[in-house]
Amino acid sequence: MQDLRVPTITFKDPIRGVVPCKNMREYPVYIKATEISITGDDRIDEIAQRPEIYGKYNEDMSYMIVDFNIEKLYEEKFDMTKLKTLGIPNAV
């Protein structure tokens, strides 16, 4: 499994002084395996554990689907009802 730890950095705030926050992490490059149609009721963790996606008990791999579709999800404010398809990356 990939190391997903994100380093903590600090910045100076004129009111609060030095403030810790998480640095941005780079999204890994995945290879698209397939694209699936979704409905507003679908949840990414449930999609991940489908037998044809990553298999039973693999909902922990849902982060790869989120990473792969992050721009689309962000544009729609993570509202799954506005999405029609999701790209599914190959498992690493």
Image: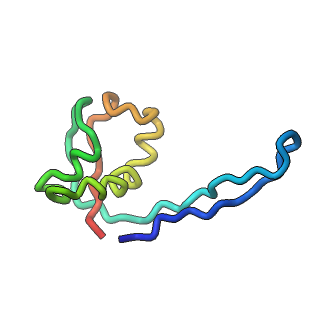
Q: In the displayed image of the protein, which residue is found farthest to the left?
A: 51
The x and y percentages for residue 33 are 23, 61
The residue located at (41%, 36%) in the rendering is: 78
The residue located at (12%, 55%) in the rendering is: 52
Could you tell whether 74 is left or right of 35 in the image? right
Q: In the displayed image of the protein, which residue is found farthest to the right?
A: 14
Could you tell whether 19 is left or right of 30 in the image? right
Q: Is residue 29 above or below residue 12?
A: below
Of 59 and 37, nearer the camera is 59
The x and y percentages for residue 77 are 46, 33
The residue located at (61%, 64%) in the rendering is: 7
Q: Quadrant of the C terminus?
A: bottom left
The residue located at (65%, 60%) in the rendering is: 8
Of 75 and 12, nearer the camera is 12
Query: Quadrant of the rendered structure where residue 46 is?
Result: top left
Question: Total of numbered circles in the picture?
Answer: 0
Q: Quadrant of the N terminus?
A: bottom left
Q: Is residue 46 above or below residue 53?
A: above
- Which color scheme is applied? rainbow
The x and y percentages for residue 66 are 38, 50
Query: Quadrant of the rendered structure where residue 80 is?
Result: top left
The x and y percentages for residue 64 are 35, 57
